[in-house]
Amino acid sequence: MRRTISQLMDPDAQLPVGEALDLVQQVLRGHMQLIIPEVEQAARQRDKEDVSRYCALACVGEARGRLRAVARPGEHGALAYARRLARSLAALCDHHEALAGVVMCLACDQPLRDGEDTLPYDHVSPSGSALRAGRIHTRCAHTIRRH
């Protein structure tokens, strides 16, 4: 999911156009349709007063709204819509990881398992400009990851 997001959010990426952009939109929509129920279920298992529950459910509501929306006509409208989908998907991924207690490698998007060699890593979050600190596999230390 994060690889698809990076196709639109990486400042150095060559942006998809035409049919490629349509395909990326379809993939983003499919990813969102898969992850929305997962985030919603994980959030509803939390206490009703839990802030993470409230934030995740708000994100789910926003994502559903984005799925109902349509792109404005033209290439620029399609790209703007795809980027909105990508930002919503990134936020859903962040909520899923937090609610499920899954710690992902920020370089390769694979889970960090107990006993694996890891290193601390600072990264800019695709869902905002805030610094996202986390960990990466030691084997991923030389991987450059951009959104």
Image (cartoon, helix red, strand yellow):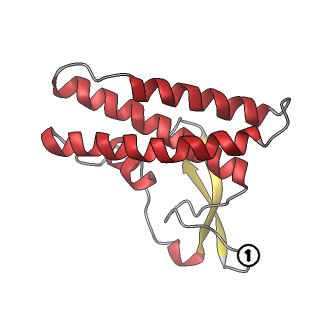
Relative vertical location of residue 117 with respect to residue 109 in this rendering, above or below: below
Q: Is residue 27 left or right of residue 146?
A: left
Q: Amino acid type of disc 1? A: Asp
Mark 1 lies on a secondary structure that is: loop
| Residue 105 image point, x, y percent | 58, 64
Q: Nearer the viewer, residue 125 or 103?
A: 103
Q: Is residue 56 left or right of residue 27?
A: right
Residue depicted at x 50% and y 42%? 90
| Residue 131 image point, x, y percent | 60, 43
Residue depicted at x 39% and y 45%? 30
Mark 1 nearby-residue class (10 Å; few <14, some 14–19, many ≥20): few
| Residue 3 image point, x, y percent | 40, 55
| Residue bearing mark 1 | 114
Relative vertical location of residue 120 with respect to residue 124 in this rendering, above or below: below
Relative vertical location of residue 11 with respect to residue 77 in this rendering, above or below: below
List the single residue furthest toward the top: 72
